Image (tube, rainbow, N blue to C red):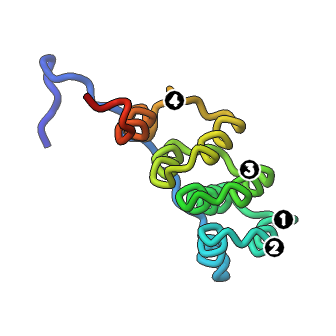
Amino acid sequence: MEQPSIYSPPLPAVPVIPRLTIPADNSLEDLKKASESGDLEKVMELVEGKNRPLDYLDYGLCAAVGAGQVAVARCLFENGAIIAPGIAIKAATAKSVKIFELLMEYGWGVNDPSCGGFVVLPYVLAPLKFLSK
């Protein structure tokens, strides 16, 4: 391995990427399916009153946001899900103003950088006619 010299820039710190805590049962896949389909009753059954890890809730939130399921996303926020860096990208795929409004209600800002360091809003607005020349 090559040693850094005085002319080499310092090496960036390697970020620690948290791993998804996979429950022993099949509930993670059940949560994803229920979140995507908007089955609020099933989502509530899977998360309410249970000691689930936060990444479990975030996984469901990501599925709900990507599918445009506002009620399910709200339920997951109310049970402790947080806005992860990639959530705005999932919201952009849903093409739902209501999803973005919900994210803003829970602390996301339109100029917040996403997981790649870029702002998602221009990508959401780009297909709109008023932006084309």
Residue drawn where x is 71% and y is 38% of the image: 106
Taking the image as shown, residue 82 lies to the left or right of residue 19, namely right
- Pick the residue in front: 55 or 4: 55
Callout 4, which amino acid?
A: Asp
- Which residue bears the numbered disc 2? 45
Choose the circle earlier in sequence order: 4 or 3: 3
Residue drawn where x is 58% and y is 55% of the image: 65
Q: Disc 4 on helix, strand or loop?
A: loop
Callout 2, which amino acid?
A: Glu
Choose the circle earlier in sequence order: 4 or 1: 1
Residue drawn where x is 74% and y is 52% of the image: 74
Q: Marks 1 and 4: in contact by CB < 8 Å?
A: no
Location of residue 47 by image quarter: bottom right
Q: Closer to the camera: disc 4 or disc 1?
A: 4
- Which residue bears the numbered disc 3? 77
Q: CA distance from mark 1 to mark 3?
A: 11 Å
Q: Give how far across and how far down residue 113 sits, in percent.
A: 46, 31
Residue drawn where x is 45% and y is 53% of the image: 93
- Which residue bears the numbered disc 1? 48
Image disc number at residue 112: 4
- Pick the residue in front: 72 or 17: 72
Taking the image as shown, residue 64 lies to the left or right of residue 13, namely right
Choose the circle earlier in sequence order: 2 or 3: 2
Q: Give how far across and how far down residue 7 sits, in percent.
A: 12, 18
Q: Give how far across and how far down residue 56 sits, in percent.
A: 65, 62
Badge 2: residue crowd in 10 Å (few <14, some 14–19, many ≥20): few
